[in-house]
Structure formats: C-alpha cells, structure tokens
Image: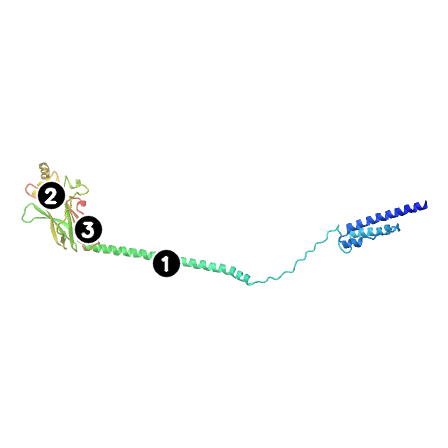
Amino acid sequence: MWYIGAMRLKGLALLAALLTFTHTPVQVSGQATHPSDAKRTTSPRVPASSSHAPQTASSPNAEAGSSSAKGDCNGGPCEDQQRPVIVTLPAPVPEVWSWHARVLWAALVLLPIVGYAGIWLCLSALKKIERQTASAATAATAAAISAQAALLNAQATIDAERPWLLITVEPSPGIENLFTIMVTNRGRTPATIIATAEGTAFAVDESYLPRIPGYGEPSTPRIPIILLSGESTAIKTFGRDEGRRICESEERFKRVANWEEKVFILGKVVYKDLISSAEKQTHETAWCCWYIHGRQKSGLVLAGPPSYNSHT
C-alpha cells in the first residue's frame, strides 16, 4: 500500500512538473522580443524528483515575466509596448556653386536686361523711321506740288507760245456780195493746217440749232498750209450765188429772203503746232457764220452758239 501511494505521489509530482514546464515557456516566449530574450527567460527543466521545485521556480519567473511585460524586458521594449521611432536627419551638405549654376544665373540676369535694351532700341529705331517717313512724305508732297506747279507753268508757257488760229470774214475786194472766210495765226509759233470741214444748217434762230454741229467729210489740203505768226489764208468764199444754191428749193429761198428762216454756214480747221507733245499737237478751231440775203446786197457775219465757235 505504501508503495502504491508513493508511486501515485511520484506520478502527481511528475505531472505537476510537466504542467509547470509547459506553462512557463509559453508565458516567457509570448513576452520576449528577441530570440536571445527567450533563451534568457526560459527556465531549465526541473528534475521530476523534486516535486515542489518547479512550483517555486515558476512563481518567481511568472512574477518576473509579469513585471517585464509591464516594464522593461532585459533592457529593451516588450512586444506589447510601442517602440519609439527615432528619425535621425543627415547633416546638411553645403551646396557647391558650380560654373554651370553660375552661367545659368548670369544668363537669367542678363537676358531680361538684353531684352529690355533690344526693345528700347527697336522702339527708338521705329520712331526714327516714322519721323524719316513723315519727312520723306512731306518732301514728296512738296516735290509733287513743285512739279505740278512747274508743269502748269510749262503748260502756260506752251499755251502762250503755241499758235492760235482765229476766223474772220472779209468782203472780197472788187467783187460785190462776195465774202472770204479767213484764218489767221494769232499765236507766237507756226501752225500747220492739216484738214478742214464745212457744213450748213437752217433754223429760225441760232437758239434752234442742233447742240452738236454737223460737218461734212473733212478735206485734207494737197500741200500742208503752214502759217507763221500773224499770217492769214482764205479757207472759203461765199456769195449770193452760193446762198441761192444751198437753199435747194424756191420756197426755202423765199423764206430766207424774207428772213423767215436763217442760213448758217459752219466749219472747222484742224491744225498742229510745233512745240507741244505729240498727243497734244492737234488743235481745232470751229466757226459759224450767218448768211443775210437782201434784195440787192447780201451779208456774212459771225454768229452761232459757243459750241459752234470753239477753240482747242
């Protein structure tokens, strides 16, 4: 009986030792933060012969484990506590100003200055160009006015020196009722007659004449007639016989003789001068005369509206 009881006590002691062994490492391993801490906190096995030694050893270890869980685990933080994070910043490295940076800085400083100087020079040049353009425009305007004045002066000189052919009516000497239409050069330079044209018109009064005079086909003299200044030449003769012939009927001739209708003899002289330009050398002198048929004497006088007595 005693032997059986001793064996039971031995079994209980072994069971208590096993329980203590299995309980103690779990608590210590859960609290350790490093493998070295687990090794230091893990208690060695207690022989099974000492039944109370495991309990006595486990109690201090548990208290130590509980105190280390709340405080310090062998000089280091435990797992259930947050480890402080310490951030160490590197020491500032002094910046080295390389020649690239210097060139860039110089460019950034000089570029605005150069740009401003360029803009100022451009504006100054534009103002100078504007002033020069205005001066050139003024000079050109003055030159144009001067040239126009010179041209007008030259044209006035040409007009004063050019030939002017005028028409006059003169009675033929020694022949009664015969008249001669004369053209005279009243200008200062010679004139060359290149063509003449004639026509007739019947109207109650000169105010009833057509607005545009009607001439026949111009005739060119076989030999050009040159008139010097002051010279004259006859271009047409007209008398009673011509007045009766152009009436073409006895009834019209009676109306002309009774002054119920008037007979107008008209024409023009085309001539050239020697001092004008080629496109302005040709001139014309238009003339118009009223034939008066009397019972015994006749007359021929200049008449007609201005368009029938024009000069170009």
- Neighbourhood count class around disc 1 (C-alpha, 10 Å): few under 14, some 14–19, many 20 upward: few
Q: Position of residue 254 (x, y in %)?
A: 9, 37
Sequence-first tag of 3 and 1: 1
Judge from the rendering whether residue 12 lies leftward or rightward of residue 110; answer left or right: right
Please name whichever residue, 63 or 240, is drawn nearer the observer in this view of the structure: 63
Disc marking residue 145: none
Disc 1 is placed on an element classified as helix
Please name whichever residue, 125 or 4, is drawn nearer the observer in this view of the structure: 4
Q: Nearer the viewer, mark 3 or mark 1?
A: 3
**Disc 2: which residue:** 291
Q: Which residue appears farthest toward the right when viewing the image? A: 1
Residue plotted at (43% across, 59% down): 121
Q: Is residue 65 visible?
A: yes
Q: Quadrant of residue 248?
A: top left
Q: Quadrant of residue 145?
A: bottom left
Report the amino acid beneath label 3.
Thr
| On-image quarter of the N terminus | top right
The answer to whether the residue labelled 2 contacts the one labelled 1, judged by CB atoms less than 8 Å apart, is no
Give the Cα distance between marks 2 and 1: 69 Å
Give the Cα distance between marks 3 and 2: 30 Å
Please name whichever residue, 245 or 23, is drawn nearer the observer in this view of the structure: 23
Report the amino acid beneath label 2.
Tyr
Sequence-first tag of 2 and 1: 1
Disc 2 is placed on an element classified as strand
**Disc 1: which residue:** 132
**Disc 3: which residue:** 282
Q: Position of residue 182 (x, y in %)?
A: 12, 49
